[in-house]
Image (cartoon, grey):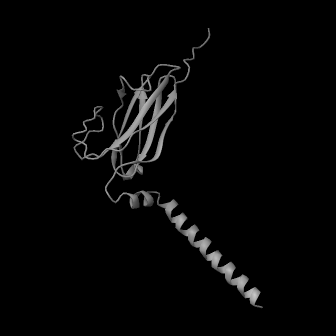
Amino acid sequence: MNRKVTIIIFTVFFGLLILSGNISTSLLLHNPTAYADQQDSNNSLFITHGIASGDVTNQSVIIWSRANREAQLHVEYDTDPNFPDPKSSNIALANQTTDYTAHVKLEGLSPDTVYYYRVWFSSYTSSSSSSSSSFDSKNASIVSDNMTGSFRTAINSSASS
């Protein structure tokens, strides 16, 4: 009889342990900023989910990222991975309404070309402009580390006659 009681207690204990883990994981999944908020005790700014490029055409691409709090998304791009002469995109705002995500569309790209891009976030004030393409580090109080990526634009297809 002791063996059955021990097995029942063991099963109930580990069942509750697993259930409590699932509950906390579930709560974290329903509030994806919970972990980032806990890690943000020193008011730091960082990229939470990496960077992504998508919707690539022969002349454009969308660059996406997510910050841990309100910030401005900056993207520079070049055909050289060392960025000797980078071009800058417009700045996009990441805020609570967008779940701290932001994206920019890079246009006027050359077909069938590899581009390298770097992404970072900076804090902003209400006087910041979302259409400005320049970045002044003196006016940004907090800047995240940057992340880099690359993509190739589509081949320029021409209709046959």
Camera-side residue: 38 or 53? 38
The residue furthest bottom is 1
* Quarter containing the C terminus: top right
Location of residue 89 in the rendering, given as x and y in whole percent from the top left corner: 36, 31
Location of residue 53 in the rendering, given as x and y in whole percent from the top left corner: 49, 35
Report whether 5 appears left or right of 110: right
Write the residue at 42% across / 22% down: 108
Vertical comparison of 35 with 65: above or below:
below
Write the residue at 33% across / 37% down: 91
Count every numbered label the image shows and give the total: 0
Location of residue 39 in the rendering, given as x and y in whole percent from the top left corner: 40, 58
Write the residue at 47% across / 26% down: 115
Write the residue at 28% across / 32% down: 134
Vertical comparison of 160 with 21: above or below:
above
* Quarter containing the N terminus: bottom right
Camera-side residue: 58 or 40? 40
Report whether 106 appears left or right of 143: right
Camera-side residue: 4 or 100? 4
Vertical comparison of 69 with 56: above or below:
below
Report whether 33 appears left or right of 17: left
The residue furthest right is 1
Location of residue 60 in the rendering, given as x and y in whole percent from the top left corner: 46, 27
The residue furthest top is 161
